[in-house]
Image (tube, grey):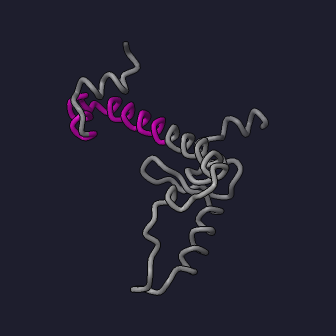
C-alpha cells in the first residue's frame, strides 16, 4: 500500500473487512461500516427472500454452519469487526470528553459506572 493510500484509510467494511481505499463507497453506521459491494450482496439476498408472510430463516448464522473450516475462516473477520467497533466507540467517547461531557454522563449512557467508563476509555492507569 502506498504511503498516500495508507493515510487515507479511515475504516473497513464490518462485513468483508475491505478498507475504504479498496471499495467504491463505504457507508458509516453507529460504529460499523458497510461497503457498496456488501450492499449489493445484501440487495441480492433481500430480493430473493420469500414473500411477506412466507417462511423466514430462524437460525443464527453460527447455527447454520456445519464446517469447522467455515467457522475458523469467520473468527478473524468477526474479531476484526469487533475491534473496529471498539476503536470507534473509544473515538466517540474521546469526542464526548472533548466536548465537555462528564465521565458520569458517559458511563450512564453506556450503562456502566463513571469509574468503569473512565477505566475503560481514559487511557490513564
> Is-magenta flag for residue 2?
no
Point out residue 112 in the picture as x, y percentages from the top left corner: 24, 34
- In this rendering, position of residue 93 left or right of residue 2: left
Residue nearest the observer in this picture, 81 or 11: 81
Point out residue 98 in the picture as x, y percentages from the top left corner: 35, 30
Give me the residue at 30% from left, 24% from top: 118
Q: How many numbered discs, if any?
A: 0
Give me the residue at 50% from left, 83% from top: 50
Residue 2, above or below 18:
above
Give me the residue at 56% from left, 80% from top: 47
Residue nearest the observer in this picture, 89 or 76: 76
**Quarter in which the C terminus is drawn:** top left
- In this rendering, position of residue 37 left or right of residue 28: right
| Predominant SS along the magenta part | helix
Point out residue 114 in the picture as x, y percentages from the top left corner: 22, 27
Residue 5, above or below 49:
above
Give me the residue at 61% from left, 62% from top: 38
Residue 18, above or below 45:
above
Task: Identify the residue at the far right of this view.
Answer: 2
**Which segment did they paint magenta?**
85-110
**Quarter in which the N terminus is drawn:** top right
Amino acid at each position: 500500500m502506498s504511503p498516500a493510500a495508507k493515510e487515507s484509510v479511515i475504516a473497513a467494511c464490518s462485513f468483508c473487512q475491505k478498507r475504504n481505499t479498496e471499495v467504491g463507497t463505504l457507508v458509516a453506521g453507529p460504529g460499523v461500516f458497510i461497503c457498496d459491494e456488501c450492499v449489493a450482496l445484501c440487495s441480492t439476498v433481500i430480493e430473493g427472500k420469500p414473500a411477506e408472510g412466507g417462511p423466514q430463516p430462524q437460525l443464527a448464522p453460527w447455527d447454520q454452519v456445519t464446517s469447522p473450516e467455515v467457522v475458523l475462516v469467520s473468527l478473524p473477520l468477526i474479531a476484526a469487526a469487533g475491534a473496529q467497533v471498539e476503536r470507534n466507540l473509544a473515538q466517540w467517547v474521546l469526542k464526548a470528553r472533548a466536548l465537555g461531557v462528564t465521565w458520569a454522563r458517559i458511563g450512564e449512557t453506556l450503562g456502566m459506572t463513571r469509574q468503569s467508563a473512565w477505566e475503560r476509555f481514559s487511557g490513564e492507569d
